[in-house]
Image (cartoon, grey):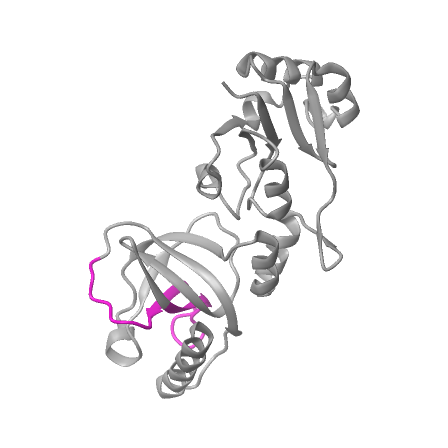
Amino acid sequence: MIKSIAIGSFDGIHIAHQELIKRAEGVLVIERGSATLTPGWKRSLYTKKPTFFYLLENIKTLSPQEFINKISRDFPKLEKIVVGYDFVFGKDRQGTIKILEQNFKGQVEVVPEVKIDNISVHSRVIREYIKSNKIEIANKMLNRFYRIDGEHIKGLGLGSKELVPTINLKVKQYTLPNGVFAVNAYIESRVYKAIAFVGHRESLDNSFTIEVHILENFNTGIKNSVWIEFKNFIRETKKFNSLKELKEQILNDIKIAKRLHN
């Protein structure tokens, strides 16, 4: 039975979240439905500890005392709650850490603010770094490579004929960067060095796409979701006047990606 639990939204399971989690036996996620770093159940991929979910929709009308009562019922052996310094809870966010300490019968451990390079680590900050292509900083705050997964879909067919062969992905809910990146691609239980394009195909049909080119020998079929890890930013997206110019740029990008991987 769980005797201590860390509570929060935990989108990203970044280094500040990890500080909470390492102090508890279990993790209680308040699922708001707005997570875009680690959507839904995928939070559980980044901790070995048992992970539980409360849907915000189901608890948002609870008063602070009713919320505390619910936790006490759901975890009857609970002796300690771990929260961040800015934790609020209950209807209209009325519950404060002081209220939690006064009304929970066990221990309340409050984890102070976590900073990197004097920048406070929050999911919203990481999302902004990702959207502005500052992947290396985001990875530092996550304490891992930023990862997304997607469904393999059919592309335009130009890659293997005119440019380079790519795996096209349909990705839902994640915060996305925009540009060309050195990535790791996880396909059917194997990891490959790869390069990814994320953005609008300005030189072709201007549609949004995520395309991955594998830099190693690759001839397997794809049945399951493909995961990619963003390692390094290479360049912004741009429009080219011809397929020849585009291909020359892609080949140069590949050279850079290989150097970054090595």
Looking at the image, can residue 88 be seen?
Answer: no
For the residue pair 207 and 155, the one nearer the viewer reads as: 155
For the residue pair 192 and 206, the one nearer the viewer reads as: 192
The residue sitting at 56% across, 14% down in the picture is: 77
The residue sitting at 31% across, 79% down in the picture is: 163
Q: Position of residue 175 (x, y in %)?
A: 53, 53
Looking at the image, can residue 65 be seen?
Answer: yes
Count of residue discs: 0
Q: Is residue 209 left or right of residue 219?
A: right
The residue sitting at 59% across, 17% down in the picture is: 78
- The quarter of the picture where residue 169 lies is bottom left
Q: Is residue 11 left or right of residue 94?
A: left
The residue sitting at 52% across, 70% down in the picture is: 233
- Asked if residue 215 is among those painted magenta in the image, a careful observer would answer yes
Q: Is residue 146 left or right of residue 222?
A: right
Q: Position of residue 13 (x, y in %)?
A: 55, 44
Q: Is residue 97 above or below residue 118?
A: above
Q: Is residue 134 above or below residue 151?
A: below
Q: Is residue 155 above or below residue 257?
A: above
**Residues in magenta?**
194-221
- The quarter of the picture where residue 8 lies is top right
Q: Quadrant of the C terminus?
A: bottom left
Q: Position of residue 202 (x, y in %)?
A: 45, 74
- Asked if residue 24 is among those painted magenta in the image, a careful observer would answer no
Q: Position of residue 90 (x, y in %)?
A: 68, 23
